[in-house]
Image: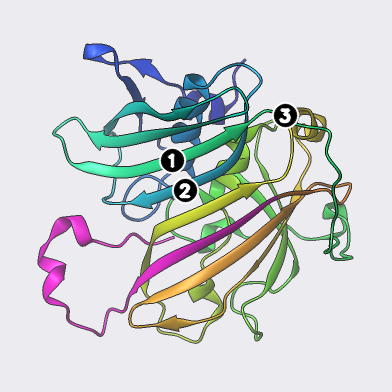
Amino acid sequence: MDSVFEDATRLWRAPGGRLQADVHDAFLTGGGAFGGWILAVATRALRGAAEAGMVPKTLNAEFLAAAPSGASVIIAVSALRTAAASECHRARLHLTDGTPVAEATMLLSRPRDDPSFTVRTMPCVPSPDELQALDRSLFPGTWVASHDMRHALGAPGADGDGTSRVWTRLLGDDAMDFERLAALTDASIARSYYRPAPRPAIATVSISNHYHCTEGTLAAIGGQHVLIEASTTIGTHGYFDQDSRIWAPDGTLLATSRQLVRARYPSRSHPEDADPRSAARTT
Protein backbone atom coordinates (compact mmCIF):
# COMPACT_ATOMS: atom_id res chain seq x y z
CA MET A 1 0.00 0.00 0.00
CA ASP A 2 1.29 3.46 -0.89
CA SER A 3 2.08 5.84 1.94
CA VAL A 4 0.14 9.07 2.45
CA PHE A 5 3.13 10.92 1.03
CA GLU A 6 3.08 8.83 -2.15
CA ASP A 7 -0.64 9.45 -2.58
CA ALA A 8 -0.27 13.15 -1.82
CA THR A 9 2.53 13.75 -4.35
CA ARG A 10 1.24 11.54 -7.17
CA LEU A 11 1.37 13.13 -10.62
CA TRP A 12 -1.30 12.74 -13.28
CA ARG A 13 -1.40 13.52 -16.98
CA ALA A 14 -3.43 16.67 -17.54
CA PRO A 15 -5.02 17.66 -20.87
CA GLY A 16 -2.35 18.80 -23.28
CA GLY A 17 0.21 16.35 -21.92
CA ARG A 18 1.24 18.41 -18.92
CA LEU A 19 1.45 17.01 -15.41
CA GLN A 20 -1.06 17.60 -12.63
CA ALA A 21 -0.86 17.25 -8.85
CA ASP A 22 -3.87 17.56 -6.55
CA VAL A 23 -3.41 19.44 -3.27
CA HIS A 24 -3.76 16.86 -0.49
CA ASP A 25 -5.54 17.43 2.83
CA ALA A 26 -2.61 15.95 4.78
CA PHE A 27 -0.19 18.68 3.65
CA LEU A 28 -1.91 22.01 4.26
CA THR A 29 -0.92 25.18 6.07
CA GLY A 30 -3.34 27.83 7.24
CA GLY A 31 -3.46 29.33 3.74
CA GLY A 32 -3.06 26.45 1.28
CA ALA A 33 -0.61 23.75 0.27
CA PHE A 34 2.44 23.21 2.47
CA GLY A 35 5.58 24.55 0.79
CA GLY A 36 7.24 21.16 1.21
CA TRP A 37 4.44 19.61 -0.85
CA ILE A 38 5.09 22.11 -3.64
CA LEU A 39 8.80 21.24 -3.55
CA ALA A 40 8.06 17.51 -3.57
CA VAL A 41 5.74 17.54 -6.60
CA ALA A 42 8.10 19.87 -8.47
CA THR A 43 10.96 17.48 -7.69
CA ARG A 44 8.96 14.50 -8.92
CA ALA A 45 8.22 16.29 -12.20
CA LEU A 46 11.78 17.55 -12.68
CA ARG A 47 13.40 14.20 -11.93
CA GLY A 48 11.00 12.57 -14.34
CA ALA A 49 12.28 14.80 -17.13
CA ALA A 50 15.95 13.98 -16.54
CA GLU A 51 17.99 11.15 -18.04
CA ALA A 52 18.42 7.99 -15.96
CA GLY A 53 21.35 8.20 -13.57
CA MET A 54 21.15 11.96 -13.09
CA VAL A 55 21.15 12.97 -9.40
CA PRO A 56 19.69 16.26 -8.10
CA LYS A 57 22.31 18.74 -6.89
CA THR A 58 20.27 21.95 -6.51
CA LEU A 59 16.62 22.92 -6.29
CA ASN A 60 15.69 26.59 -6.37
CA ALA A 61 12.08 27.65 -6.04
CA GLU A 62 10.12 30.88 -5.91
CA PHE A 63 6.65 30.67 -4.34
CA LEU A 64 4.25 33.01 -6.13
CA ALA A 65 0.77 32.29 -4.76
CA ALA A 66 -1.05 29.86 -2.50
CA ALA A 67 -2.53 26.61 -3.85
CA PRO A 68 -5.84 26.25 -1.98
CA SER A 69 -7.13 23.05 -0.42
CA GLY A 70 -8.75 20.86 -3.07
CA ALA A 71 -7.05 22.67 -5.95
CA SER A 72 -5.24 21.03 -8.84
CA VAL A 73 -1.78 22.27 -9.80
CA ILE A 74 -0.61 22.00 -13.42
CA ILE A 75 3.13 21.48 -13.91
CA ALA A 76 4.93 22.38 -17.13
CA VAL A 77 8.55 21.17 -17.36
CA SER A 78 11.12 22.39 -19.86
CA ALA A 79 14.81 21.63 -20.34
CA LEU A 80 17.19 24.55 -19.92
CA ARG A 81 20.35 22.54 -20.59
CA THR A 82 21.14 18.90 -21.31
CA ALA A 83 24.64 17.44 -21.55
CA ALA A 84 26.37 14.16 -20.85
CA ALA A 85 27.49 15.18 -17.36
CA SER A 86 24.70 17.49 -16.17
CA GLU A 87 21.22 18.77 -16.91
CA CYS A 88 19.09 21.70 -15.81
CA HIS A 89 15.29 21.70 -15.98
CA ARG A 90 12.61 24.21 -15.05
CA ALA A 91 9.11 23.53 -13.70
CA ARG A 92 6.32 26.11 -13.76
CA LEU A 93 3.37 25.36 -11.50
CA HIS A 94 0.00 27.06 -11.85
CA LEU A 95 -3.63 26.55 -10.94
CA THR A 96 -6.15 25.44 -13.54
CA ASP A 97 -7.29 29.06 -13.92
CA GLY A 98 -3.74 30.08 -14.86
CA THR A 99 -2.74 31.62 -11.51
CA PRO A 100 1.01 31.00 -11.06
CA VAL A 101 1.87 29.06 -7.90
CA ALA A 102 5.63 28.49 -8.08
CA GLU A 103 8.60 28.23 -10.39
CA ALA A 104 11.46 25.82 -9.71
CA THR A 105 14.75 24.94 -11.38
CA MET A 106 16.82 21.82 -10.73
CA LEU A 107 20.42 21.05 -11.62
CA LEU A 108 21.24 17.35 -11.86
CA SER A 109 24.53 15.58 -12.56
CA ARG A 110 26.05 12.13 -12.80
CA PRO A 111 27.89 11.11 -9.60
CA ARG A 112 31.67 10.96 -9.94
CA ASP A 113 34.26 9.32 -7.71
CA ASP A 114 36.15 12.55 -6.98
CA PRO A 115 37.94 13.52 -3.74
CA SER A 116 35.57 14.83 -1.07
CA PHE A 117 35.81 16.64 2.25
CA THR A 118 33.58 17.52 5.19
CA VAL A 119 34.21 20.52 7.44
CA ARG A 120 31.16 20.32 9.69
CA THR A 121 29.99 17.27 11.59
CA MET A 122 26.55 16.38 12.85
CA PRO A 123 25.86 17.80 16.34
CA CYS A 124 25.86 15.34 19.21
CA VAL A 125 22.22 14.96 20.29
CA PRO A 126 20.11 12.32 22.07
CA SER A 127 18.51 9.67 19.88
CA PRO A 128 14.88 10.14 18.78
CA ASP A 129 13.76 7.39 21.18
CA GLU A 130 15.03 9.47 24.10
CA LEU A 131 13.00 12.54 23.16
CA GLN A 132 9.34 13.47 23.41
CA ALA A 133 7.34 13.99 20.23
CA LEU A 134 6.15 17.52 19.47
CA ASP A 135 2.54 18.24 20.37
CA ARG A 136 1.34 18.68 16.80
CA SER A 137 -2.05 20.05 17.88
CA LEU A 138 -0.41 23.34 18.87
CA PHE A 139 0.25 24.31 15.26
CA PRO A 140 -2.21 25.29 12.51
CA GLY A 141 -2.58 23.38 9.28
CA THR A 142 -2.26 19.64 8.74
CA TRP A 143 1.32 19.32 7.54
CA VAL A 144 2.78 19.29 11.06
CA ALA A 145 0.46 16.40 11.95
CA SER A 146 1.97 14.43 9.04
CA HIS A 147 5.41 14.54 10.67
CA ASP A 148 6.99 13.08 13.80
CA MET A 149 9.22 15.81 15.27
CA ARG A 150 11.40 15.34 18.34
CA HIS A 151 13.29 18.39 19.58
CA ALA A 152 16.80 17.85 20.88
CA LEU A 153 17.38 21.62 21.07
CA GLY A 154 15.25 24.72 20.82
CA ALA A 155 11.62 23.75 21.19
CA PRO A 156 9.22 26.44 19.88
CA GLY A 157 8.40 29.00 22.56
CA ALA A 158 11.62 28.36 24.49
CA ASP A 159 14.11 31.14 25.11
CA GLY A 160 17.04 31.04 22.72
CA ASP A 161 18.49 32.41 19.51
CA GLY A 162 16.14 30.59 17.16
CA THR A 163 18.38 27.57 16.64
CA SER A 164 16.78 24.13 16.73
CA ARG A 165 17.86 20.53 16.25
CA VAL A 166 14.93 18.27 15.52
CA TRP A 167 14.73 14.59 14.62
CA THR A 168 12.04 14.51 11.93
CA ARG A 169 10.36 11.91 9.75
CA LEU A 170 7.17 11.56 7.75
CA LEU A 171 4.61 9.54 9.70
CA GLY A 172 3.56 6.19 8.25
CA ASP A 173 6.36 6.23 5.70
CA ASP A 174 9.21 3.73 5.39
CA ALA A 175 11.10 5.30 2.49
CA MET A 176 13.41 8.21 1.77
CA ASP A 177 14.14 9.75 -1.61
CA PHE A 178 14.76 13.16 -3.15
CA GLU A 179 11.04 14.00 -3.15
CA ARG A 180 10.83 13.40 0.58
CA LEU A 181 14.12 15.18 1.20
CA ALA A 182 12.83 18.21 -0.71
CA ALA A 183 9.69 18.26 1.45
CA LEU A 184 11.77 18.01 4.63
CA THR A 185 13.82 21.09 3.72
CA ASP A 186 10.67 23.10 4.48
CA ALA A 187 9.65 21.04 7.52
CA SER A 188 11.13 23.17 10.28
CA ILE A 189 8.74 25.13 12.48
CA ALA A 190 9.01 28.75 11.34
CA ARG A 191 11.57 30.81 13.23
CA SER A 192 8.80 33.27 14.10
CA TYR A 193 7.63 30.70 16.68
CA TYR A 194 11.01 31.15 18.39
CA ARG A 195 10.53 34.88 18.83
CA PRO A 196 8.40 36.79 21.36
CA ALA A 197 4.72 37.36 20.52
CA PRO A 198 2.96 38.57 18.47
CA ARG A 199 3.53 35.84 15.91
CA PRO A 200 2.94 36.79 12.27
CA ALA A 201 1.28 34.89 9.48
CA ILE A 202 4.16 33.63 7.34
CA ALA A 203 4.85 32.32 3.87
CA THR A 204 8.06 31.03 2.31
CA VAL A 205 8.77 33.13 -0.77
CA SER A 206 12.08 31.64 -1.91
CA ILE A 207 14.14 28.54 -1.11
CA SER A 208 17.47 27.21 -2.34
CA ASN A 209 18.45 23.59 -1.65
CA HIS A 210 21.84 21.98 -2.21
CA TYR A 211 22.01 18.18 -2.12
CA HIS A 212 25.12 16.26 -1.06
CA CYS A 213 23.91 12.67 -1.32
CA THR A 214 22.95 9.93 -3.74
CA GLU A 215 19.80 7.88 -4.17
CA GLY A 216 21.54 4.98 -2.44
CA THR A 217 22.34 7.11 0.61
CA LEU A 218 18.69 8.10 0.91
CA ALA A 219 17.34 4.60 0.30
CA ALA A 220 19.45 3.30 3.20
CA ILE A 221 17.69 5.69 5.61
CA GLY A 222 14.26 4.21 4.95
CA GLY A 223 11.74 5.38 7.52
CA GLN A 224 14.27 6.56 10.11
CA HIS A 225 14.34 10.10 11.48
CA VAL A 226 16.75 12.64 10.01
CA LEU A 227 18.18 15.49 12.06
CA ILE A 228 17.18 18.95 10.86
CA GLU A 229 19.38 21.71 12.26
CA ALA A 230 17.74 25.09 11.62
CA SER A 231 18.64 28.68 12.49
CA THR A 232 17.92 32.28 11.59
CA THR A 233 20.15 35.32 11.24
CA ILE A 234 17.93 38.34 10.68
CA GLY A 235 14.33 39.47 10.35
CA THR A 236 13.70 42.88 8.86
CA HIS A 237 11.20 44.81 6.69
CA GLY A 238 8.66 41.99 6.90
CA TYR A 239 11.00 39.11 5.98
CA PHE A 240 13.31 36.73 7.82
CA ASP A 241 15.83 34.12 6.72
CA GLN A 242 15.95 30.47 7.73
CA ASP A 243 18.90 28.13 7.18
CA SER A 244 18.94 24.38 7.69
CA ARG A 245 21.16 21.33 7.45
CA ILE A 246 19.70 17.85 7.18
CA TRP A 247 21.74 14.95 8.54
CA ALA A 248 21.25 11.21 8.10
CA PRO A 249 21.21 9.11 11.31
CA ASP A 250 24.81 8.01 10.60
CA GLY A 251 26.01 11.64 10.43
CA THR A 252 26.06 12.02 6.63
CA LEU A 253 25.14 15.54 5.55
CA LEU A 254 22.27 15.11 3.09
CA ALA A 255 21.31 18.69 2.24
CA THR A 256 21.78 22.34 3.08
CA SER A 257 18.98 24.83 2.55
CA ARG A 258 18.32 28.55 2.80
CA GLN A 259 14.96 30.22 2.52
CA LEU A 260 13.43 33.67 2.80
CA VAL A 261 10.13 33.91 4.62
CA ARG A 262 7.59 36.73 4.51
CA ALA A 263 6.06 37.74 7.85
CA ARG A 264 2.81 39.66 8.21
CA TYR A 265 1.96 40.91 11.68
CA PRO A 266 -1.73 41.28 12.51
CA SER A 267 -1.25 44.70 14.07
CA ARG A 268 0.11 46.14 10.83
CA SER A 269 -1.85 47.48 7.88
CA HIS A 270 -0.50 46.95 4.38
CA PRO A 271 -2.18 48.19 1.19
CA GLU A 272 -0.99 45.09 -0.69
CA ASP A 273 -3.21 42.92 1.56
CA ALA A 274 -6.03 43.67 -0.88
CA ASP A 275 -4.25 41.47 -3.45
CA PRO A 276 -5.15 37.81 -2.70
CA ARG A 277 -1.94 36.64 -4.37
CA SER A 278 0.04 38.37 -1.62
CA ALA A 279 -1.74 36.55 1.21
CA ALA A 280 0.70 34.90 3.60
CA ARG A 281 0.02 31.44 4.94
CA THR A 282 0.48 30.36 8.52
CA THR A 283 2.65 27.38 9.42
Q: Mark 1 points at which residue?
A: 105
Graded by Cα atoms within 10 Å as few (under 14), some (14 to 19) or many (20 or more), the crowding at tag 3 reads: some
Q: How many labels does the image show?
A: 3
Indicate the amino acid at tag 1: Thr
Q: Tell me where residue 272 appears, x and y as whole percent.
A: 14, 70
Q: Tell me where residue 99 appears, x and y as whole percent.
A: 17, 41
Q: Is residue 147 left or right of residue 208?
A: right
Q: Closer to the N terminus: mark 1 or mark 2?
A: 2
Query: For the residues marked 3 and 1, what is the alpha-carbon distance in whole angstroms?
Result: 19 Å
Q: Is residue 185 visible?
A: no
Question: Which portion, as a residue range, is magenta?
Answer: 255-283
Q: Closer to the N terminus: mark 3 or mark 1?
A: 1
The colour scheme of the drawn protein is rainbow
- What residue is at 89 percent from the left and 65 percent from the top? 124
Q: Name the residue under label 2.
A: 60
Please tell me whether residue 227 is drawn above or below residue 222 in the rendered image.
below
Which quadrant of the figure contains the C terminus?
Answer: bottom left
Q: Is residue 109 left or right of residue 274?
A: right
CB under 8 Å between callouts 1 and 2?
A: yes
Q: Which of 247 and 115 is in front in this view?
A: 115
Query: For the residues marked 2 and 3, what is the alpha-carbon distance in whole angstroms?
Result: 19 Å
Q: Tell me where residue 33 appears, x and y as whole percent.
A: 37, 44
